[in-house]
């Protein structure tokens, strides 16, 4: 079938394009051409989603039957996709899988998040990430009806990840020696491998599934400590964990999630990782062994230009001077 990836050249979208090509679909990606080229075999359509005319012009009569949308970050992007696909490809379109975020929920973070239909999403007009995703869901669902599925993704990991969260831990742990870690190694975590999410998004579009899905791993599938141990296993480093209490980290100016990726203060962590994924499991969202996600990310990272953090985002990681100060105190 003709499958359009909105996005498709960077991380999740790239894996979607690969998965769709492997299924034998006729794949096109739609991007500005800033973040590179799509995988071989996909046709590269060019344009800016924020330009109302761009998508219809780029499609030039090519009517997608399936769409996987990984690149929606503005209200205009949602409006324009809805208008273009309603007008140009609406009749041919059988399934549209949209990548949203748990941030679409008004109460996340810190959650907890129960079944999808029981939790309110944002309905405010502010230009923040969560409200924009919630607006995009509503706008596209209004046009596409029961052909529209929204995947509210949690933490996504895997090769080609530009956000350098797992990547930072891998690099730091690989350097070895005494490594500052939060004294919260039992903190539960959940995540989804981009390749698992990508294949499943193609499935969902093919099957014309609809509704909202909390698209992440099962609550309690792993812990921060297990992720760190896996980083040490796959990098082969001699890292020695130096556990630092939450109060001391915060007093030293360590920013949760940003300076120590994946770490949240205990009060938030208790509920933020507690997301009901019953529907994702019912719909077959796979979850490969975490070891494979960590090992494959490390293998990719060793041969890639990194970190390749998108414009406007800060590089995560603990500032070296803060780490020195925390280590000197013990
Ligand atoms: N990473 C996480 O943990 C996480 C968690 C929850 C949800 N999400 C969501 O998951 C999705 C993952 O994104 P990804 O980066 O992996 O997807 P991707 O499709 O691999 O990369 C983003 C694509 O968007 C294109 N793009 C950016 N701005 C554009 C514009 N104005 N017009 C047209 N194309 C544009 C980029 O190409 P050009 O730059 O060349 O235009 C790039 O191909 C996002 O929607 C994100 O909100 C991520």
Image (tube, rainbow, N blue to C red):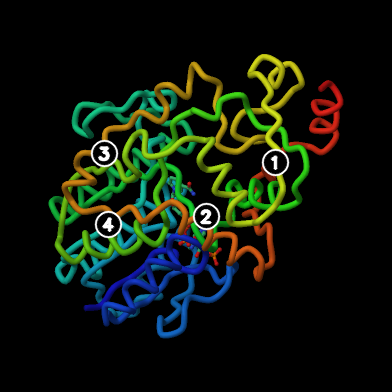
In this picture, residue 241 sits left or right of residue 300? right
Q: Which residue is mark 1?
A: 317
In the orientation shown, which residue stands out farthest toward the bottom? 41
Locate residue 249: give its quadrant: top right
Mark 3–mark 2 Cα distance, whole angstroms, equals: 22 Å
Locate residue 263: give its quadrant: top right
Mark 4–mark 2 Cα distance, whole angstroms, equals: 26 Å
First-in-chain label (4 vs 2): 4
- Confirm or deny contact between disc 3 and disc 2 (CB under 8 A): no
Give 242 or 258, whichever is nearer the viewer. Answer: 242
- For the residue carrying disc 1, how many other residues have a C-alpha within 10 Å: few (<14), some (14-19), or many (20+)? many
Q: Secondary structure at mark 1?
A: loop
Return the mark for residue 217. Answer: none
Mark 4 vs mark 2: give the one in front: 2
Residue at image position (46%, 49%) is 73
First-in-chain label (1 vs 3): 3
Residue at image position (58%, 48%) is 166
Mark 4 vs mark 1: give the one in front: 1
Mark 1–mark 2 Cα distance, whole angstroms, equals: 17 Å
First-in-chain label (3 vs 2): 3
Q: Secondary structure at mark 4?
A: strand
Q: Secondary structure at mark 3?
A: loop
């Amino acid at each position: 079938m003709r499958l359009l990836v909105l996005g498709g050249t960077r991380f999740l979208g790239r894996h979607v394009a690969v998965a769709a090509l492997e299924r034998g679909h006729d794949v096109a990606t739609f991007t500005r051409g800033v973040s590179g080229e799509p995988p071989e075999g996909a046709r590269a359509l060019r344009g800016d989603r924020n330009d109302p005319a761009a998508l219809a012009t780029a499609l030039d009569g090519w009517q997608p039957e399936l769409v996987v949308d990984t690149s929606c970050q503005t209200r205009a992007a949602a409006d324009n996709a809805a208008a273009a696909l309603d007008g140009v490809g609406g009749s041919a379109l059988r399934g549209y899988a949209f990548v949203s975020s748990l941030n679409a929920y008004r109460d996340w973070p810190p959650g907890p998040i129960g079944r999808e239909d029981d939790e309110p999403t944002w309905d405010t007009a502010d230009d923040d990430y969560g409200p924009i995703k919630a607006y995009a869901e509503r706008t596209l669902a209004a046009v596409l009806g029961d052909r529209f599925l929204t995947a509210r993704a949690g933490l996504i990991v895997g090769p080609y990840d530009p956000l350098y969260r797992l990547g930072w831990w891998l690099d730091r742990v690989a350097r070895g020696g005494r490594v500052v870690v939060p004294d919260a190694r039992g903190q539960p975590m959940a995540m989804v491998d981009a390749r698992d999410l990508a294949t499943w998004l193609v499935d969902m579009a093919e099957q014309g599934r609809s509704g909202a899905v909390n698209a992440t791993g099962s609550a309690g599938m792993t812990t921060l400590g297990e992720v760190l141990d896996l980083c040490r296993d796959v990098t082969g480093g001699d890292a020695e964990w130096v556990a630092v209490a939450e109060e001391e980290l915060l007093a030293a100016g360590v920013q949760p999630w940003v300076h120590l990726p994946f770490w949240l203060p205990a009060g938030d962590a208790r509920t933020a990782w507690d997301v009901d994924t019953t529907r994702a499991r019912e719909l077959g969202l796979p979850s490969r062994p975490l070891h494979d996600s960590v090992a494959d990310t490390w293998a990719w990272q060793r041969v890639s230009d990194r970190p390749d953090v998108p414009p406007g985002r800060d590089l995560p990681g603990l500032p070296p001077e803060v780490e020195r100060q925390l280590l000197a105190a013990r």
